[in-house]
Image: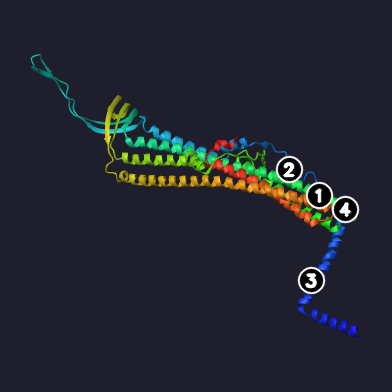
């Protein structure tokens, strides 16, 4: 009786506890977990009964397998001449060069030829002819020859005239300074072309390296998919024979699906980087380029921080362009000051005119005229001439400040690129060590799973860690090459990008 009373009390106490909210929530949780466990066992059993899919050979084939490989040297050479930005800079250089030739032409003599034809009407008086006295040897005047009364010309005539004029400004200091300013502008535009080429080369190099890394990541995804597929088939047969739980086969199927989607993403990345590389060198993006993989040390150069900064100031085209722009502004200032000085020039003109009287009384026949003139000109009372110097001084000051800003920016870029290479080396060493540790862990977990000590989750976790470590190493090598390329470009050593 005591035992029955005790059991009854325990049942009542349990019933009271179940009526509490927390107890009811726990009961629901346990019930849901049991239901999910039963469902998962059912799904796992159906997964074992289903034949595992095989890997399609076309899915593991590189989408750029049929593309012609391009070398790093070829990419650099094409980036120097084919991108639209470089072609635009070359067109601007042609324009500035033509402007320099026009400025030089202003120093040469100018020949002007004219041809006129028309009808003229004259109505003007004609003075009487002058009488010439006739004298003897002793000075006695015996008469006069010539002379007559005054008359008028009233005629409509046809005129044909040809003229030639040669003029030359022998002394004009402002034009000489204009020529020097145009020459400096041409040199600045040449360096601007080098700036465009440098930017195009850097973009092409970065995309070349990224495309190579994308192809390596695609190959790594193929390896992972192949490994997951073989693993899933093996676990399927083991589970069908009852040697492994059915949940292991289901878990392997999930990892296989994940690896398939990862391979699809890597394929898209490879196509995208190949198309971007084609655009960087002025090619059709619908035909992606396939890069030849670079060695890890292909772009390695021993450049420290101080050397990078000094080389950048001495070799970067942006600095050279800024210096030439400043030189052009200095010559423009001198030209504005020289415009206040008088100019000296000379000109000669000759003309031949044929005139035929159509109606009335006038002059007809061939007429010749020739003249030579020396001129001295001074625009001392032109307010615009005096104010041009103020504008030129302001332009020169702005060019000087822009040059200082360019030098500071270039120096900072070189220093930052040098430190970025050091940082990339450290991260690569870290990625290599992590991959080695992950490989050892994956090997150990694989042995433990074969012996039945480790679970499938532990094995898959180790394999996933190794896969991430492999991807991290590939990306670390990519980042190192990117940093090395940026350092070479930031230091102005563009020619060394084509080893």
Q: Residues within 10 Å of mark 2 (few under 14, many from 20)?
A: some
What's the image's color scheme?
A: rainbow
Q: Position of residue 320 (x, y in %)?
A: 46, 39
Q: Which numbered disc, 1 or 3, marks the residue that appears first in the sequence? A: 3
* Residue that carries the numbered disc 4 in the rendered image: 238
Q: Which numbered disc, 1 or 4, marks the residue that appears first in the sequence? A: 1
**Residue 93, visible in the rendered structure:** yes
SS of the residue at dot 4? helix
Image depth: mark 2 or mark 1 in front: 1
Q: Residues within 10 Å of mark 4 (few under 14, many from 20)?
A: some
Q: Residues within 10 Å of mark 3 (few under 14, many from 20)?
A: few
- Give the image quarter of residue 47: bottom right
SS of the residue at dot 2? loop
- Give the image quarter of residue 203: top right
Q: Quadrant of the N terminus?
A: bottom right
Q: Position of residue 387 (x, y in %)?
A: 32, 46
For the residues labelled 4 and 2, the Cα–Cα distance comes to: 33 Å
* Residue that carries the numbered disc 1 in the rendered image: 229
For the residues labelled 2 and 1, the Cα–Cα distance comes to: 18 Å
Image depth: mark 4 or mark 2 in front: 4
For the residues labelled 3 and 4, the Cα–Cα distance comes to: 33 Å
């Amino acid at each position: 009786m005591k035992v029955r009373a005790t059991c009854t009390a325990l049942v009542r106490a349990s019933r009271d506890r179940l009526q509490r909210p927390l107890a009811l929530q726990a009961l629901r949780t346990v019930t849901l977990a049991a239901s999910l466990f039963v469902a998962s066992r059912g799904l796992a059993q159906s997964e074992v009964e289903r034949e595992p899919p095989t890997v399609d050979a076309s899915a593991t084939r590189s989408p750029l397998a049929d593309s012609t490989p391009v070398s790093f040297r070829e990419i650099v050479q094409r980036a120097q001449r084919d991108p639209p930005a470089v072609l635009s800079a070359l067109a601007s250089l042609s324009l500035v060069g033509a402007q320099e030739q026009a400025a030089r032409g202003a120093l040469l003599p100018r020949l002007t030829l004219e041809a006129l034809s028309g009808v003229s009407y004259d109505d003007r008086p004609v003075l009487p002819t002058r009488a010439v006295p006739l004298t003897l040897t002793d000075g006695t005047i015996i008469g006069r020859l010539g002379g007559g009364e005054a008359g008028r010309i009233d005629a409509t005539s046809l005129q044909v005239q040809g003229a030639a004029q040669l003029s030359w400004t022998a002394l004009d200091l402002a034009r000489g300074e204009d020529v020097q300013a145009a020459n400096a502008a041409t040199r600045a535009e040449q360096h601007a072309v080098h700036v465009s080429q440098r930017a195009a080369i850097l973009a092409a190099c970065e995309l070349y390296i990224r495309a190579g890394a994308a192809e390596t990541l695609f190959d790594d995804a193929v390896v992972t998919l192949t490994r997951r597929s073989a693993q899933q088939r093996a676990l399927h047969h083991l589970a069908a024979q009852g040697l492994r739980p059915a949940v292991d086969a289901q878990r392997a199927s999930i990892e296989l699906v994940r690896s398939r989607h990862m391979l699809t993403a890597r394929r898209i990345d490879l196509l995208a980087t190949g198309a971007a590389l084609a655009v960087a060198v002025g090619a059709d993006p619908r035909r992606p380029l396939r890069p030849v993989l670079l060695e890890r040390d292909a772009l390695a150069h021993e450049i420290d921080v101080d050397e990078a900064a000094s080389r950048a100031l001495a070799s970067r085209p942006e600095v050279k362009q800024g210096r030439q722009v400043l030189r052009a502004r200095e010559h423009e200032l001198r030209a504005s000051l020289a415009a206040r000085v008088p100019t000296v020039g000379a000109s000669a003109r000759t003309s031949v005119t044929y005139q035929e009287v159509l109606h009335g009384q006038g002059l007809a026949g061939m007429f010749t005229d020739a003249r030579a003139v020396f001129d001295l000109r001074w625009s001392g009372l032109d307010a615009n001439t005096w104010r041009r110097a103020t504008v030129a001084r302001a332009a020169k000051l702005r060019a000087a400040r822009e040059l200082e800003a360019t030098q500071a920016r270039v120096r900072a870029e070189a220093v930052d690129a040098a430190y970025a290479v050091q940082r990339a080396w450290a991260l690569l060493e870290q990625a290599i060590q992590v991959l080695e540790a992950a490989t050892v862990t994956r090997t150990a977990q694989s042995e433990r799973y074969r012996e039945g000590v480790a679970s499938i989750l532990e094995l898959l976790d180790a394999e996933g860690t190794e896969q991430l470590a492999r991807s991290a190493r590939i990306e670390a090598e990519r980042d190192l090459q990117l940093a090395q390329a940026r350092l070479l470009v930031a230091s102005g050593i563009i020619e060394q990008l084509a080893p």
